[in-house]
Image (tube, rainbow, N blue to C red):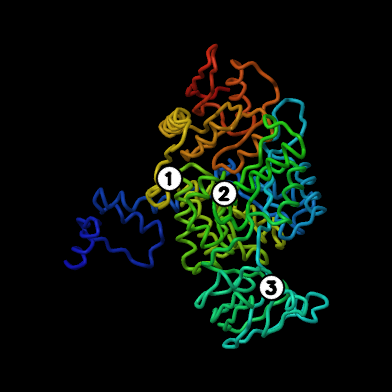
Protein backbone atom coordinates (compact mmCIF):
# COMPACT_ATOMS: atom_id res chain seq x y z
CA UNK A 1 0.00 0.00 0.00
CA UNK A 2 1.56 3.34 -0.97
CA UNK A 3 1.63 6.34 1.35
CA UNK A 4 -1.09 8.21 -0.52
CA UNK A 5 -3.47 5.25 -0.32
CA UNK A 6 -2.74 4.74 3.37
CA UNK A 7 -3.36 8.43 4.05
CA UNK A 8 -6.72 8.25 2.25
CA UNK A 9 -7.81 5.26 4.34
CA UNK A 10 -6.89 7.04 7.55
CA UNK A 11 -8.80 10.16 6.50
CA UNK A 12 -11.85 7.95 5.92
CA UNK A 13 -11.57 6.50 9.40
CA UNK A 14 -10.08 3.14 8.37
CA UNK A 15 -7.03 2.19 10.47
CA UNK A 16 -3.78 1.37 8.72
CA UNK A 17 -2.76 -2.27 9.07
CA UNK A 18 0.46 -2.73 11.05
CA UNK A 19 1.59 -5.46 8.67
CA UNK A 20 0.56 -5.79 5.05
CA UNK A 21 -1.69 -8.68 4.11
CA UNK A 22 -1.08 -10.51 0.87
CA UNK A 23 -3.90 -12.85 -0.11
CA UNK A 24 -3.76 -14.84 -3.33
CA UNK A 25 -7.00 -14.54 -5.26
CA UNK A 26 -7.05 -18.27 -5.90
CA UNK A 27 -7.23 -19.15 -2.22
CA UNK A 28 -10.56 -20.51 -0.96
CA UNK A 29 -12.69 -18.25 1.23
CA UNK A 30 -11.71 -19.86 4.59
CA UNK A 31 -8.02 -19.21 3.86
CA UNK A 32 -8.80 -15.55 3.30
CA UNK A 33 -10.23 -15.26 6.79
CA UNK A 34 -7.24 -17.04 8.35
CA UNK A 35 -5.09 -14.26 6.92
CA UNK A 36 -6.97 -11.62 8.92
CA UNK A 37 -5.04 -12.52 12.09
CA UNK A 38 -2.31 -10.08 11.08
CA UNK A 39 -4.67 -7.10 11.31
CA UNK A 40 -4.61 -4.92 14.39
CA UNK A 41 -7.45 -5.07 16.88
CA UNK A 42 -9.58 -2.33 15.36
CA UNK A 43 -9.18 -3.62 11.83
CA UNK A 44 -10.03 -7.15 12.89
CA UNK A 45 -13.17 -6.00 14.62
CA UNK A 46 -14.19 -4.05 11.55
CA UNK A 47 -13.96 -7.04 9.22
CA UNK A 48 -14.93 -9.99 11.42
CA UNK A 49 -18.70 -9.48 10.91
CA UNK A 50 -18.20 -10.39 7.26
CA UNK A 51 -17.16 -13.84 8.40
CA UNK A 52 -20.41 -14.12 10.33
CA UNK A 53 -22.27 -13.94 7.06
CA UNK A 54 -20.57 -17.19 6.03
CA UNK A 55 -20.69 -18.82 9.47
CA UNK A 56 -24.38 -18.25 10.18
CA UNK A 57 -26.40 -21.46 9.93
CA UNK A 58 -28.83 -21.75 7.07
CA UNK A 59 -32.05 -20.23 8.46
CA UNK A 60 -34.14 -22.96 6.89
CA UNK A 61 -36.36 -25.52 8.54
CA UNK A 62 -34.78 -26.97 11.67
CA UNK A 63 -31.75 -24.72 12.14
CA UNK A 64 -33.85 -21.62 12.91
CA UNK A 65 -37.35 -23.01 13.35
CA UNK A 66 -39.15 -20.01 14.80
CA UNK A 67 -41.42 -17.92 12.61
CA UNK A 68 -39.76 -14.69 11.47
CA UNK A 69 -40.31 -11.52 13.46
CA UNK A 70 -41.32 -9.53 10.38
CA UNK A 71 -44.68 -10.50 8.92
CA UNK A 72 -45.69 -11.70 5.47
CA UNK A 73 -48.79 -10.34 3.74
CA UNK A 74 -49.97 -12.45 0.80
CA UNK A 75 -52.52 -11.48 -1.83
CA UNK A 76 -54.80 -14.47 -2.37
CA UNK A 77 -56.19 -14.90 -5.87
CA UNK A 78 -57.14 -17.52 -8.45
CA UNK A 79 -53.97 -19.61 -8.09
CA UNK A 80 -53.98 -19.71 -4.28
CA UNK A 81 -57.62 -19.55 -3.20
CA UNK A 82 -58.36 -23.29 -3.12
CA UNK A 83 -58.18 -24.79 0.36
CA UNK A 84 -55.19 -27.09 -0.11
CA UNK A 85 -52.99 -24.37 -1.59
CA UNK A 86 -54.12 -21.79 0.94
CA UNK A 87 -53.32 -24.18 3.78
CA UNK A 88 -49.79 -24.51 2.41
CA UNK A 89 -49.49 -20.72 2.11
CA UNK A 90 -50.56 -20.39 5.76
CA UNK A 91 -48.15 -23.11 6.85
CA UNK A 92 -45.26 -21.43 5.04
CA UNK A 93 -45.70 -18.18 6.95
CA UNK A 94 -48.52 -15.96 5.67
CA UNK A 95 -49.80 -13.85 8.56
CA UNK A 96 -52.22 -11.57 6.74
CA UNK A 97 -54.37 -12.40 3.72
CA UNK A 98 -54.85 -9.47 1.34
CA UNK A 99 -58.03 -9.25 -0.71
CA UNK A 100 -57.49 -6.91 -3.66
CA UNK A 101 -60.84 -5.32 -4.47
CA UNK A 102 -59.50 -3.77 -7.63
CA UNK A 103 -60.19 -7.24 -9.03
CA UNK A 104 -61.95 -9.50 -6.50
CA UNK A 105 -65.71 -10.11 -6.54
CA UNK A 106 -67.74 -10.84 -3.43
CA UNK A 107 -68.13 -14.44 -4.51
CA UNK A 108 -64.36 -14.84 -4.83
CA UNK A 109 -63.77 -13.08 -1.52
CA UNK A 110 -66.27 -15.33 0.26
CA UNK A 111 -64.43 -18.42 -0.97
CA UNK A 112 -61.06 -17.07 0.17
CA UNK A 113 -62.30 -16.00 3.60
CA UNK A 114 -64.12 -19.29 4.21
CA UNK A 115 -61.08 -21.33 3.19
CA UNK A 116 -58.79 -19.24 5.39
CA UNK A 117 -60.97 -19.91 8.42
CA UNK A 118 -60.64 -23.65 7.75
CA UNK A 119 -56.85 -23.53 7.71
CA UNK A 120 -54.77 -24.56 10.68
CA UNK A 121 -51.93 -22.48 12.06
CA UNK A 122 -49.34 -23.02 14.74
CA UNK A 123 -51.00 -20.44 16.99
CA UNK A 124 -54.53 -21.76 17.03
CA UNK A 125 -56.58 -20.91 20.06
CA UNK A 126 -55.36 -22.29 23.36
CA UNK A 127 -57.35 -24.75 25.37
CA UNK A 128 -56.75 -28.43 25.59
CA UNK A 129 -59.74 -29.64 23.61
CA UNK A 130 -58.07 -29.65 20.17
CA UNK A 131 -60.58 -27.28 18.57
CA UNK A 132 -59.54 -25.15 15.60
CA UNK A 133 -61.90 -22.21 15.80
CA UNK A 134 -59.40 -19.74 14.39
CA UNK A 135 -55.80 -19.71 13.21
CA UNK A 136 -55.39 -15.98 13.90
CA UNK A 137 -54.50 -15.18 10.31
CA UNK A 138 -55.82 -11.70 9.66
CA UNK A 139 -57.66 -10.28 6.64
CA UNK A 140 -56.77 -7.02 4.91
CA UNK A 141 -59.26 -5.48 2.50
CA UNK A 142 -57.44 -3.38 -0.09
CA UNK A 143 -59.76 -0.84 -1.71
CA UNK A 144 -59.56 0.20 -5.34
CA UNK A 145 -59.67 3.80 -4.20
CA UNK A 146 -60.73 6.92 -6.05
CA UNK A 147 -59.22 6.78 -9.49
CA UNK A 148 -59.17 8.45 -12.88
CA UNK A 149 -59.59 6.39 -16.05
CA UNK A 150 -59.77 6.95 -19.77
CA UNK A 151 -62.96 6.17 -21.65
CA UNK A 152 -64.03 3.24 -23.73
CA UNK A 153 -62.45 3.12 -27.18
CA UNK A 154 -64.65 3.62 -30.22
CA UNK A 155 -65.92 0.34 -31.69
CA UNK A 156 -64.46 -1.67 -28.80
CA UNK A 157 -67.18 -4.30 -28.58
CA UNK A 158 -65.37 -6.94 -26.50
CA UNK A 159 -63.00 -4.76 -24.42
CA UNK A 160 -59.91 -6.15 -26.16
CA UNK A 161 -59.28 -3.40 -28.68
CA UNK A 162 -56.21 -1.18 -28.33
CA UNK A 163 -55.00 1.92 -30.12
CA UNK A 164 -51.48 3.14 -30.78
CA UNK A 165 -50.42 6.59 -29.64
CA UNK A 166 -47.33 7.58 -31.61
CA UNK A 167 -44.51 9.63 -30.13
CA UNK A 168 -44.66 13.29 -31.22
CA UNK A 169 -48.34 13.18 -32.16
CA UNK A 170 -50.85 15.52 -30.57
CA UNK A 171 -53.89 14.28 -28.70
CA UNK A 172 -56.74 16.15 -27.01
CA UNK A 173 -58.11 14.96 -23.68
CA UNK A 174 -61.80 15.63 -23.11
CA UNK A 175 -64.11 15.37 -20.11
CA UNK A 176 -67.35 16.04 -22.01
CA UNK A 177 -70.13 13.50 -22.35
CA UNK A 178 -70.07 13.94 -26.14
CA UNK A 179 -66.62 12.38 -26.49
CA UNK A 180 -67.46 9.77 -23.87
CA UNK A 181 -70.50 8.60 -25.81
CA UNK A 182 -68.74 8.69 -29.19
CA UNK A 183 -65.79 6.66 -27.94
CA UNK A 184 -62.11 7.52 -27.64
CA UNK A 185 -59.65 7.60 -30.54
CA UNK A 186 -55.95 8.27 -31.03
CA UNK A 187 -56.70 11.98 -31.46
CA UNK A 188 -59.50 12.50 -28.92
CA UNK A 189 -59.45 10.65 -25.60
CA UNK A 190 -62.13 10.81 -22.92
CA UNK A 191 -60.99 11.16 -19.28
CA UNK A 192 -63.55 10.60 -16.51
CA UNK A 193 -62.28 13.35 -14.17
CA UNK A 194 -64.33 16.55 -14.69
CA UNK A 195 -61.69 18.78 -13.09
CA UNK A 196 -58.86 17.73 -15.41
CA UNK A 197 -58.52 21.05 -17.26
CA UNK A 198 -58.41 22.93 -13.95
CA UNK A 199 -55.62 20.96 -12.28
CA UNK A 200 -53.13 20.53 -15.14
CA UNK A 201 -51.15 23.27 -16.83
CA UNK A 202 -48.57 23.51 -19.61
CA UNK A 203 -45.62 21.37 -18.58
CA UNK A 204 -47.70 18.92 -16.54
CA UNK A 205 -47.55 15.23 -17.40
CA UNK A 206 -50.43 12.81 -17.84
CA UNK A 207 -49.59 9.13 -17.47
CA UNK A 208 -51.75 6.46 -19.07
CA UNK A 209 -51.84 2.79 -18.08
CA UNK A 210 -49.30 2.96 -15.22
CA UNK A 211 -46.97 5.12 -17.27
CA UNK A 212 -46.96 2.97 -20.41
CA UNK A 213 -47.78 6.15 -22.33
CA UNK A 214 -46.68 9.62 -21.19
CA UNK A 215 -48.42 12.78 -22.39
CA UNK A 216 -46.93 16.25 -21.98
CA UNK A 217 -49.53 18.99 -21.52
CA UNK A 218 -49.30 21.84 -24.04
CA UNK A 219 -52.49 23.81 -23.35
CA UNK A 220 -55.43 23.55 -20.97
CA UNK A 221 -58.87 24.96 -21.85
CA UNK A 222 -61.21 25.10 -18.85
CA UNK A 223 -64.13 26.58 -20.80
CA UNK A 224 -64.22 23.74 -23.32
CA UNK A 225 -63.11 21.03 -20.85
CA UNK A 226 -60.19 20.07 -23.09
CA UNK A 227 -56.45 19.57 -22.66
CA UNK A 228 -54.03 19.41 -25.60
CA UNK A 229 -51.02 17.12 -25.14
CA UNK A 230 -48.07 15.71 -27.03
CA UNK A 231 -47.29 12.00 -26.87
CA UNK A 232 -43.78 11.47 -25.49
CA UNK A 233 -43.14 7.89 -26.64
CA UNK A 234 -45.10 5.48 -28.80
CA UNK A 235 -47.30 3.04 -26.90
CA UNK A 236 -50.64 1.22 -26.89
CA UNK A 237 -53.61 1.76 -24.59
CA UNK A 238 -56.89 -0.04 -24.13
CA UNK A 239 -60.30 1.04 -22.91
CA UNK A 240 -60.54 2.22 -19.31
CA UNK A 241 -56.80 2.72 -18.86
CA UNK A 242 -55.68 4.14 -15.54
CA UNK A 243 -54.66 7.80 -15.50
CA UNK A 244 -52.10 9.43 -13.18
CA UNK A 245 -51.53 13.16 -12.80
CA UNK A 246 -48.19 13.41 -10.96
CA UNK A 247 -47.82 16.55 -8.91
CA UNK A 248 -51.35 17.76 -9.65
CA UNK A 249 -53.58 17.99 -6.55
CA UNK A 250 -57.03 16.60 -7.25
CA UNK A 251 -60.31 16.92 -5.40
CA UNK A 252 -61.36 13.30 -5.77
CA UNK A 253 -63.43 11.99 -2.84
CA UNK A 254 -61.45 9.81 -0.38
CA UNK A 255 -63.86 6.90 -0.96
CA UNK A 256 -65.56 6.00 -4.20
CA UNK A 257 -69.01 4.43 -4.27
CA UNK A 258 -67.37 1.10 -5.02
CA UNK A 259 -65.08 1.50 -2.02
CA UNK A 260 -68.05 2.05 0.27
CA UNK A 261 -69.81 -1.05 -1.07
CA UNK A 262 -66.64 -3.13 -0.69
CA UNK A 263 -65.88 -1.91 2.83
CA UNK A 264 -69.46 -2.56 3.93
CA UNK A 265 -69.10 -6.12 2.66
CA UNK A 266 -65.78 -6.49 4.47
CA UNK A 267 -67.22 -5.30 7.76
CA UNK A 268 -69.98 -7.88 7.46
CA UNK A 269 -67.23 -10.51 7.07
CA UNK A 270 -65.30 -9.12 10.07
CA UNK A 271 -62.16 -8.03 8.22
CA UNK A 272 -59.29 -6.75 10.38
CA UNK A 273 -57.62 -4.06 8.25
CA UNK A 274 -58.65 -1.66 5.50
CA UNK A 275 -55.87 -0.56 3.15
CA UNK A 276 -57.04 2.84 1.95
CA UNK A 277 -55.80 3.40 -1.61
CA UNK A 278 -54.68 6.75 -3.04
CA UNK A 279 -54.90 8.56 0.30
CA UNK A 280 -53.92 12.19 -0.22
CA UNK A 281 -54.09 13.59 3.32
CA UNK A 282 -55.34 12.93 6.84
CA UNK A 283 -58.90 13.70 5.76
CA UNK A 284 -58.91 10.59 3.59
CA UNK A 285 -57.85 8.41 6.52
CA UNK A 286 -60.40 9.96 8.86
CA UNK A 287 -63.17 9.63 6.28
CA UNK A 288 -62.44 5.92 5.86
CA UNK A 289 -62.48 5.34 9.61
CA UNK A 290 -65.68 7.37 10.02
CA UNK A 291 -67.41 5.35 7.31
CA UNK A 292 -66.42 2.10 9.04
CA UNK A 293 -67.78 3.42 12.33
CA UNK A 294 -71.09 4.46 10.80
CA UNK A 295 -71.58 1.01 9.25
CA UNK A 296 -70.55 -0.99 12.31
CA UNK A 297 -72.23 1.01 15.04
CA UNK A 298 -75.16 2.70 13.30
CA UNK A 299 -76.19 0.42 10.45
CA UNK A 300 -75.22 -2.89 12.05
CA UNK A 301 -75.86 -1.79 15.63
CA UNK A 302 -72.77 -3.48 17.09
CA UNK A 303 -71.20 -2.66 20.44
CA UNK A 304 -68.02 -0.56 20.33
CA UNK A 305 -66.60 -2.43 23.31
CA UNK A 306 -66.82 -5.85 21.68
CA UNK A 307 -66.39 -4.94 18.00
CA UNK A 308 -63.39 -2.65 17.44
CA UNK A 309 -62.98 -0.83 14.16
CA UNK A 310 -60.69 -2.31 11.51
CA UNK A 311 -57.27 -0.71 11.53
CA UNK A 312 -56.74 1.79 8.70
CA UNK A 313 -53.54 1.27 6.71
CA UNK A 314 -52.84 4.28 4.50
CA UNK A 315 -51.29 3.46 1.12
CA UNK A 316 -48.75 6.05 0.02
CA UNK A 317 -48.75 6.16 -3.77
CA UNK A 318 -48.71 9.79 -4.92
CA UNK A 319 -46.68 12.97 -4.72
CA UNK A 320 -49.43 14.65 -2.72
CA UNK A 321 -49.39 11.84 -0.16
CA UNK A 322 -45.63 12.23 0.22
CA UNK A 323 -46.05 15.95 0.82
CA UNK A 324 -48.68 15.23 3.49
CA UNK A 325 -46.97 12.15 4.91
CA UNK A 326 -46.64 13.32 8.51
CA UNK A 327 -50.32 14.15 8.87
CA UNK A 328 -51.30 10.88 7.19
CA UNK A 329 -49.02 8.96 9.54
CA UNK A 330 -50.54 10.69 12.56
CA UNK A 331 -54.08 9.79 11.46
CA UNK A 332 -53.51 6.22 10.22
CA UNK A 333 -52.96 3.03 12.20
CA UNK A 334 -50.19 2.01 9.80
CA UNK A 335 -48.59 2.75 6.44
CA UNK A 336 -48.18 0.75 3.25
CA UNK A 337 -45.36 1.79 0.93
CA UNK A 338 -47.17 1.07 -2.36
CA UNK A 339 -44.25 1.22 -4.75
CA UNK A 340 -46.24 0.44 -7.89
CA UNK A 341 -48.25 3.63 -8.34
CA UNK A 342 -45.66 5.60 -6.39
CA UNK A 343 -43.08 4.64 -9.02
CA UNK A 344 -45.37 6.09 -11.67
CA UNK A 345 -45.93 9.34 -9.80
CA UNK A 346 -42.30 10.07 -8.89
CA UNK A 347 -39.03 9.30 -10.72
CA UNK A 348 -38.46 5.58 -10.32
CA UNK A 349 -34.94 6.12 -9.00
CA UNK A 350 -36.41 8.04 -6.05
CA UNK A 351 -38.77 5.28 -4.88
CA UNK A 352 -36.15 3.59 -2.70
CA UNK A 353 -35.25 6.89 -1.06
CA UNK A 354 -38.91 7.58 -0.32
CA UNK A 355 -39.31 4.05 1.04
CA UNK A 356 -36.42 4.49 3.46
CA UNK A 357 -37.68 7.84 4.69
CA UNK A 358 -41.21 6.55 5.27
CA UNK A 359 -40.01 3.46 7.12
CA UNK A 360 -37.80 5.60 9.35
CA UNK A 361 -40.67 7.94 10.21
CA UNK A 362 -42.96 5.00 11.01
CA UNK A 363 -40.29 3.48 13.26
CA UNK A 364 -39.86 6.79 15.06
CA UNK A 365 -43.52 6.95 16.08
CA UNK A 366 -44.00 3.22 16.57
CA UNK A 367 -46.53 2.56 13.82
CA UNK A 368 -46.36 -0.52 11.57
CA UNK A 369 -45.20 -0.18 7.99
CA UNK A 370 -45.67 -2.62 5.11
CA UNK A 371 -43.42 -2.62 2.02
CA UNK A 372 -45.23 -3.79 -1.11
CA UNK A 373 -44.99 -4.34 -4.87
CA UNK A 374 -42.75 -6.54 -7.02
CA UNK A 375 -40.80 -7.99 -4.10
CA UNK A 376 -40.58 -11.41 -5.78
CA UNK A 377 -42.06 -10.43 -9.13
CA UNK A 378 -40.01 -12.93 -11.12
CA UNK A 379 -41.56 -15.79 -9.14
CA UNK A 380 -44.85 -15.22 -10.94
CA UNK A 381 -43.31 -17.37 -13.67
CA UNK A 382 -40.09 -18.71 -12.16
CA UNK A 383 -39.55 -21.03 -9.18
CA UNK A 384 -36.54 -18.97 -8.05
CA UNK A 385 -36.20 -15.21 -7.47
CA UNK A 386 -33.53 -12.92 -8.81
CA UNK A 387 -30.66 -11.91 -6.56
CA UNK A 388 -31.87 -8.32 -6.77
CA UNK A 389 -35.27 -9.34 -5.37
CA UNK A 390 -33.61 -11.13 -2.47
CA UNK A 391 -31.57 -7.99 -1.76
CA UNK A 392 -34.72 -5.87 -1.97
CA UNK A 393 -36.50 -7.87 0.73
CA UNK A 394 -33.39 -8.09 2.89
CA UNK A 395 -32.84 -4.34 2.80
CA UNK A 396 -36.51 -3.67 3.60
CA UNK A 397 -36.02 -5.72 6.77
CA UNK A 398 -32.79 -3.88 7.60
CA UNK A 399 -34.59 -0.55 7.07
CA UNK A 400 -37.23 -1.49 9.65
CA UNK A 401 -40.28 -2.80 7.78
CA UNK A 402 -42.82 -4.56 9.99
CA UNK A 403 -44.16 -6.57 7.07
CA UNK A 404 -43.41 -7.35 3.45
CA UNK A 405 -46.11 -8.11 0.90
CA UNK A 406 -46.61 -10.44 -2.04
CA UNK A 407 -49.06 -9.41 -4.77
CA UNK A 408 -49.19 -11.17 -8.13
CA UNK A 409 -46.67 -13.72 -6.88
CA UNK A 410 -49.35 -15.43 -4.78
CA UNK A 411 -52.51 -14.12 -6.46
CA UNK A 412 -51.87 -15.26 -10.03
CA UNK A 413 -48.36 -16.73 -10.09
CA UNK A 414 -47.36 -20.28 -10.89
CA UNK A 415 -45.57 -20.79 -7.56
CA UNK A 416 -47.60 -19.18 -4.75
CA UNK A 417 -46.44 -21.58 -2.03
CA UNK A 418 -42.80 -21.41 -3.09
CA UNK A 419 -42.98 -17.60 -3.10
CA UNK A 420 -44.15 -17.47 0.52
CA UNK A 421 -41.56 -20.06 1.53
CA UNK A 422 -38.82 -18.08 -0.19
CA UNK A 423 -39.88 -14.81 1.41
CA UNK A 424 -40.02 -16.51 4.80
CA UNK A 425 -36.46 -17.79 4.42
CA UNK A 426 -35.15 -14.45 3.16
CA UNK A 427 -36.74 -12.58 6.07
CA UNK A 428 -35.41 -14.98 8.69
CA UNK A 429 -31.94 -14.85 7.21
CA UNK A 430 -31.99 -11.04 7.27
CA UNK A 431 -33.20 -10.97 10.87
CA UNK A 432 -30.55 -13.42 11.99
CA UNK A 433 -27.78 -11.41 10.35
CA UNK A 434 -29.22 -8.16 11.73
CA UNK A 435 -28.90 -9.58 15.24
CA UNK A 436 -25.44 -11.10 14.79
CA UNK A 437 -23.88 -8.22 12.85
CA UNK A 438 -25.90 -5.07 13.66
CA UNK A 439 -23.16 -2.73 12.42
CA UNK A 440 -23.57 -4.13 8.93
CA UNK A 441 -27.37 -4.09 8.93
CA UNK A 442 -27.44 -0.41 8.02
CA UNK A 443 -31.03 0.19 9.04
CA UNK A 444 -30.36 -1.14 12.53
CA UNK A 445 -27.39 1.21 12.94
CA UNK A 446 -29.12 4.34 11.67
CA UNK A 447 -32.61 3.77 13.01
CA UNK A 448 -33.64 6.33 15.60
CA UNK A 449 -35.11 4.96 18.85
CA UNK A 450 -38.86 4.98 19.17
CA UNK A 451 -40.14 7.93 21.17
CA UNK A 452 -43.67 8.19 22.50
CA UNK A 453 -44.95 11.65 21.59
CA UNK A 454 -48.48 11.26 22.89
CA UNK A 455 -50.07 9.90 26.04
CA UNK A 456 -49.38 6.52 27.68
CA UNK A 457 -45.80 7.48 28.48
CA UNK A 458 -45.77 5.08 31.44
CA UNK A 459 -46.63 2.14 29.18
CA UNK A 460 -43.90 3.18 26.80
CA UNK A 461 -41.31 3.45 29.56
CA UNK A 462 -42.16 0.00 30.92
CA UNK A 463 -42.11 -1.47 27.40
CA UNK A 464 -38.70 0.05 26.74
CA UNK A 465 -37.41 -1.41 30.01
CA UNK A 466 -38.81 -4.84 29.17
CA UNK A 467 -37.10 -4.86 25.77
CA UNK A 468 -33.84 -3.66 27.34
CA UNK A 469 -34.05 -6.49 29.87
CA UNK A 470 -34.72 -9.02 27.10
CA UNK A 471 -31.71 -7.82 25.12
CA UNK A 472 -29.52 -7.85 28.24
CA UNK A 473 -30.23 -11.48 29.13
CA UNK A 474 -30.63 -12.61 25.51
CA UNK A 475 -34.19 -13.72 26.27
CA UNK A 476 -35.77 -16.22 23.94
CA UNK A 477 -39.14 -14.47 24.23
CA UNK A 478 -41.05 -11.64 25.85
CA UNK A 479 -44.36 -12.91 27.22
CA UNK A 480 -47.03 -10.27 27.69
CA UNK A 481 -50.50 -10.72 29.15
CA UNK A 482 -52.77 -8.15 27.54
CA UNK A 483 -56.47 -7.34 27.53
CA UNK A 484 -56.46 -4.74 24.76
CA UNK A 485 -53.31 -5.27 22.68
CA UNK A 486 -51.80 -1.94 23.71
CA UNK A 487 -48.73 -3.24 25.54
CA UNK A 488 -47.63 -5.61 22.73
CA UNK A 489 -47.79 -2.70 20.28
CA UNK A 490 -45.49 -0.64 22.48
CA UNK A 491 -43.12 -3.55 22.92
CA UNK A 492 -43.01 -4.10 19.15
CA UNK A 493 -42.17 -0.43 18.60
CA UNK A 494 -38.86 -0.97 20.41
CA UNK A 495 -38.01 -3.80 17.99
CA UNK A 496 -36.59 -6.56 20.20
CA UNK A 497 -34.67 -9.42 18.60
CA UNK A 498 -36.90 -12.04 20.23
CA UNK A 499 -40.59 -12.82 19.64
CA UNK A 500 -43.29 -11.09 21.68
CA UNK A 501 -45.87 -13.68 22.74
CA UNK A 502 -49.07 -11.72 23.28
CA UNK A 503 -51.65 -13.66 25.30
CA UNK A 504 -54.93 -11.89 24.56
CA UNK A 505 -58.62 -12.51 25.32
CA UNK A 506 -60.21 -12.33 21.84
CA UNK A 507 -59.53 -13.39 18.29
CA UNK A 508 -60.07 -9.84 17.04
CA UNK A 509 -57.35 -8.40 19.24
CA UNK A 510 -55.05 -11.21 18.21
CA UNK A 511 -55.61 -10.72 14.49
CA UNK A 512 -55.12 -6.97 14.71
CA UNK A 513 -51.73 -7.55 16.33
CA UNK A 514 -50.51 -9.59 13.36
CA UNK A 515 -49.19 -6.59 11.45
CA UNK A 516 -46.72 -5.65 14.19
CA UNK A 517 -43.17 -6.92 13.91
CA UNK A 518 -42.34 -9.66 16.37
CA UNK A 519 -45.81 -10.03 17.90
CA UNK A 520 -47.22 -13.56 17.92
CA UNK A 521 -50.78 -13.42 19.29
CA UNK A 522 -52.13 -16.32 21.31
CA UNK A 523 -55.77 -16.39 22.42
CA UNK A 524 -56.50 -17.62 25.93
CA UNK A 525 -59.80 -19.39 26.47
CA UNK A 526 -59.28 -21.14 29.80
CA UNK A 527 -60.53 -18.21 31.90
CA UNK A 528 -57.80 -18.60 34.51
CA UNK A 529 -57.58 -16.37 37.57
CA UNK A 530 -55.13 -13.52 37.17
CA UNK A 531 -52.45 -14.94 39.47
CA UNK A 532 -52.38 -18.22 37.51
CA UNK A 533 -51.99 -16.66 34.06
CA UNK A 534 -48.20 -16.11 34.10
CA UNK A 535 -47.34 -19.73 34.86
CA UNK A 536 -49.95 -20.95 32.37
CA UNK A 537 -48.51 -18.63 29.71
CA UNK A 538 -45.02 -20.03 30.29
CA UNK A 539 -46.36 -23.54 29.89
CA UNK A 540 -48.27 -22.65 26.74
CA UNK A 541 -45.26 -20.88 25.21
CA UNK A 542 -43.25 -24.04 25.74
CA UNK A 543 -46.01 -26.26 24.33
CA UNK A 544 -46.15 -24.09 21.20
CA UNK A 545 -42.40 -24.43 20.69
CA UNK A 546 -41.37 -20.83 21.29
CA UNK A 547 -39.24 -21.63 24.36
CA UNK A 548 -37.50 -24.68 25.77
CA UNK A 549 -36.31 -25.81 29.17
CA UNK A 550 -33.52 -23.56 30.41
CA UNK A 551 -34.45 -20.56 28.24
CA UNK A 552 -34.63 -17.11 29.80
CA UNK A 553 -37.79 -15.10 29.15
CA UNK A 554 -39.17 -11.70 30.17
CA UNK A 555 -42.73 -11.52 31.49
CA UNK A 556 -44.84 -8.33 31.33
CA UNK A 557 -48.24 -8.27 33.01
CA UNK A 558 -50.69 -5.73 34.42
CA UNK A 559 -51.71 -5.79 38.07
CA UNK A 560 -54.79 -3.68 38.66
CA UNK A 561 -54.74 -4.32 42.40
CA UNK A 562 -57.51 -2.95 44.58
CA UNK A 563 -57.22 0.72 43.60
CA UNK A 564 -58.05 2.74 40.55
CA UNK A 565 -54.41 2.59 39.49
CA UNK A 566 -52.55 -0.23 37.85
CA UNK A 567 -48.95 -1.31 37.73
CA UNK A 568 -47.04 -3.26 35.14
CA UNK A 569 -44.61 -5.87 36.34
CA UNK A 570 -41.52 -6.96 34.49
CA UNK A 571 -40.02 -10.20 35.67
CA UNK A 572 -37.45 -12.56 34.22
CA UNK A 573 -37.93 -16.29 34.32
CA UNK A 574 -36.05 -19.39 33.35
CA UNK A 575 -38.22 -21.98 31.67
CA UNK A 576 -38.11 -25.27 33.57
CA UNK A 577 -39.04 -28.72 32.40
Marks 3 and 1, how far apart at CA: 52 Å
In the rendered image, the quadrant that contains the C terminus is top right
Residue occupying the point 72% across, 63% down: 414
Badge 2 is on which residue?
403
Judged from this view, the residue extending furthest toward the left is 3
Tell me the quarter of the picture where residue 368 sits: top right
Badge 1 is on which residue?
436
The location of residue 29, given as percent across then percent down, is 41, 59
The location of residue 209, given as percent across then percent down, is 64, 72
Q: Nearer the viewer, residue 110 or 158?
A: 158
Q: Is residue 133 left or right of residue 429?
A: right
Q: Secondary structure at mark 2?
A: strand
Residue occupying the point 62% across, 63% down: 384
Tell me the quarter of the picture where residue 531 sits: top right
**Would residue 425 be seen by someone viewing this image from the given angle?**
no
In the rendered image, the quadrant that contains the N terminus is bottom left
Q: Nearer the viewer, residue 75 or 40?
A: 75
Q: Secondary structure at mark 1?
A: helix
Q: Residues within 10 Å of mark 2 (few under 14, many from 20)?
A: many
**Which mark lies nearer to you, 1 or 2?**
2
Query: Where 463 falls versus 515 (above or below)?
Result: above
Badge 3 is on which residue?
150
Amino acid sequence: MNAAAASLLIRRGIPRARAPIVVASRLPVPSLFRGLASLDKDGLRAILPVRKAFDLPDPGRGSYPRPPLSKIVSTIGPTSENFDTLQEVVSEGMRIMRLNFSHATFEEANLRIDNLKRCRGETTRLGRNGNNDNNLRAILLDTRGPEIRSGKLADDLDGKKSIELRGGDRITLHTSDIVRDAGSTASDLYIDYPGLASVVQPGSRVLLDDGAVVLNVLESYVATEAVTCEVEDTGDIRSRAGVNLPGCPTDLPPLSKKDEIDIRYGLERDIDYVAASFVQDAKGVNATRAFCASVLYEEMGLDKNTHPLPLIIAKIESVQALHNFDEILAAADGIMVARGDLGVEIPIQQVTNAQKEMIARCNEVGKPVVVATQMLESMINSPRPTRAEVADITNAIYDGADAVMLSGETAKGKYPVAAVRMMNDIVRGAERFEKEAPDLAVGGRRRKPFKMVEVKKNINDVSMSAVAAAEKIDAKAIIVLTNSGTIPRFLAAHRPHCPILAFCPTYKIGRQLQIHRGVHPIVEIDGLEAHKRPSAAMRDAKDLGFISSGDDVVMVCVDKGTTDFFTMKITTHTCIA
